[in-house]
Image (tube, rainbow, N blue to C red):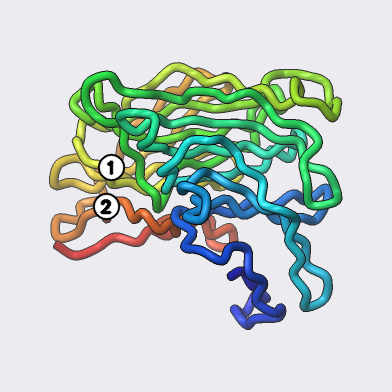
Amino acid sequence: SFTTVDSSGSAIGDAGEFNTGRSYGTSLAFDPDTSQFIIMFSDTLNSERPTIRIGTVSGTTITFGNKIEVETHSNANTTGCYYDTAKDRLITVWMSSSTGRNGIYAKGFKLNSSRGVDGTGTLATVDTASSGYNQTNASNFGAMNQNDENGNSMVDVLYEDGDDSSHNYARTVMLDDHTNADDDASCSLNVGSAAEFSTDSSNRWGIASDGTKNCIVYQEGSSVRTRTIQHFTQAISFGTYDDLSLSTMEMTFADAYGGTNMVYDPDNDCFHVAIKYT
């Protein structure tokens, strides 16, 4: 179920049921142009395929559109959805184990104002592995940077690369530069080159955006480190890492049921990260 809360955390809307089965790896986005929210999940009633539903809130009532199957991949129990306000498109990302060695994929959508879509992009492959497995952290799949110098919004997707001893990498997914037509071609995506940010062989990290850049907090051996993702184009570079000197703590492993372990606090201009004692 889905409900709406105010700034104090109190529920101000009735719970709205978006799926009658278990829904793994849920993620949320908001379209400010149509005042609609998007929930993405793995639909256990349909072979765990990546699925979205678009909803609206009127007073205390939540209304959902029909389920929209993102792709026929099954076992897609990790999802991420991000709304590109610069180009008025939804970017969806997911990991599927049905495609062999946990492939990571993306697809773009143009929403309409009636809780549906007017355009669907072609499937884009973020990465697949030929030897090991590509894994990602269900708690923090990626984050969107809305402040590219050319007016582009970019989603930085983090994952283990099974072809490189499960080292940790990032790739950028962004919409092609196109007109704002309501068609499938306007939702096409391209994927940037892979960039390594950690040699650790576990998918333990958090990522969040402060609106202009993305920050990663991640595990490197027994150390917890942080660094920024920097790019003015789709090519990624990383800032110099800082060791947080948390010798008795570590980042948590992936949780297949979704959630988040890192958020940005605009009032205090800082990031809050959930970590655990060892």
Q: Which mark is residue 253?
A: 2
Residue 236 falls left or right of residue 101? right
Residue 139 falls left or right of residue 19? left
Which residue is located at x 77 percent, y 62 percent? 56
Res 6 quadrant in image: bottom right
- Please tell me whether residue 70 is drawn above or below residue 53 in the rendered image: above
Circle 1 is placed at which residue position?
203
Which residue is located at x 43 percent, y 31 percent? 104
Circle 1 sits in a helix, a strand or a loop, which is it? loop
The amino acid marked with disc number 1 is Asn
The amino acid marked with disc number 2 is Phe
- Please tell me whether residue 44 is drawn above or below residue 238 in the rendered image: below
Q: Looking at the image, tell me whether mark 1 or mark 2 is earlier in sequence order.
A: 1
Q: Point out residue 265 in the picture as x, y percentages from the top left corner.
A: 53, 60
Marks 1 and 2, Cα distance to the nearest angstrom? 6 Å
Neighbourhood count class around disc 1 (C-alpha, 10 Å): few under 14, some 14–19, many 20 upward: many
Q: Are marks 1 and 2 in contact (CB under 8 Å)?
A: yes
